[in-house]
């Protein structure tokens, strides 16, 4: 069953820069995982994002003019990819903290990770996603 939700995505880089986004999307559970889906309008076009979380791992998939695959697993360094019109970049994430909770129509995902692109450190990122069921 898909639940319509209001989603707030906040990304903080090295405790200095913060980006925030509020969108509407859908939340659902399948097998042992939870999924959040939403769409974002960028200059390049519509980007669809899926955030999959399970017990001790998470995965962010983006598709459209910007394609991204970012895997997260606590205390592990994992490879991902970031694809733009002019090329694909290899990324790595090393997850320091991964917390997921869902209760009574609202949820929270918090991921603290070191991010690198093409082997070059790009900073420590703190991704916080909170969502709650839309009130009818």
Image (cartoon, rainbow, N blue to C red):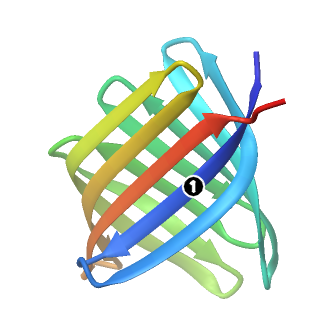
- 70 and 7: which is toward the camera: 7
Residue nearest the observer in this picture, 4 or 45:
4
From the viewer's perspective, is residue 83 above or below residue 127? below
Write the residue at 71% across / 83% down.
Answer: 85
Q: Is residue 103 left or right of residue 98?
A: right
Helix, strand or loop under label 1 = strand
Q: Quadrant of residue 132?
A: top right
Residue occupied by mark 1: 8
6 versus 87 height, above or below = above
Is residue 81 shown left or right of residue 48?
left
Q: How many neighbours does mark 1 have within 10 angstroms: few (below 14), some (14-19), or many (20 or more)?
A: some
Return the x and y of residue 64 as percentages of the image width and height.
Answer: 77, 64
Q: Position of residue 67 (x, y in %)?
A: 65, 65
Residue 124 picture location, percent across and down = 24, 71
In percent of the image, x 76 and y 72: which residue is there?
Answer: 65
Q: Residue at x 57, y 41 (%)?
A: 131
Label count reads 1
């Amino acid at each position: 069953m898909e639940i319509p939700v209001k989603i707030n995505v906040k990304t903080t880089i090295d405790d200095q820069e913060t980006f925030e986004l509020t969108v509407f999307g859908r939340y659902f559970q399948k097998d042992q995982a939870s999924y959040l889906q939403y769409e974002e309008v960028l200059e390049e076009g519509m980007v669809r994002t899926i955030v999959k979380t399970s017990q001790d791992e998470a995965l962010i998939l983006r598709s459209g003019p910007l394609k991204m695959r970012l895997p997260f697993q606590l205390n592990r360094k994992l490879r991902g990819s970031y694809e733009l019109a002019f090329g694909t970049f290899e990324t790595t994430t090393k997850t320091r903290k991964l917390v997921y909770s869902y209760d009574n129509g609202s949820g929270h995902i918090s991921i603290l990770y070191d991010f690198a692109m093409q082997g070059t450190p790009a900073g420590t990122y703190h991704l916080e996603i909170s969502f709650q069921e839309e009130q009818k």
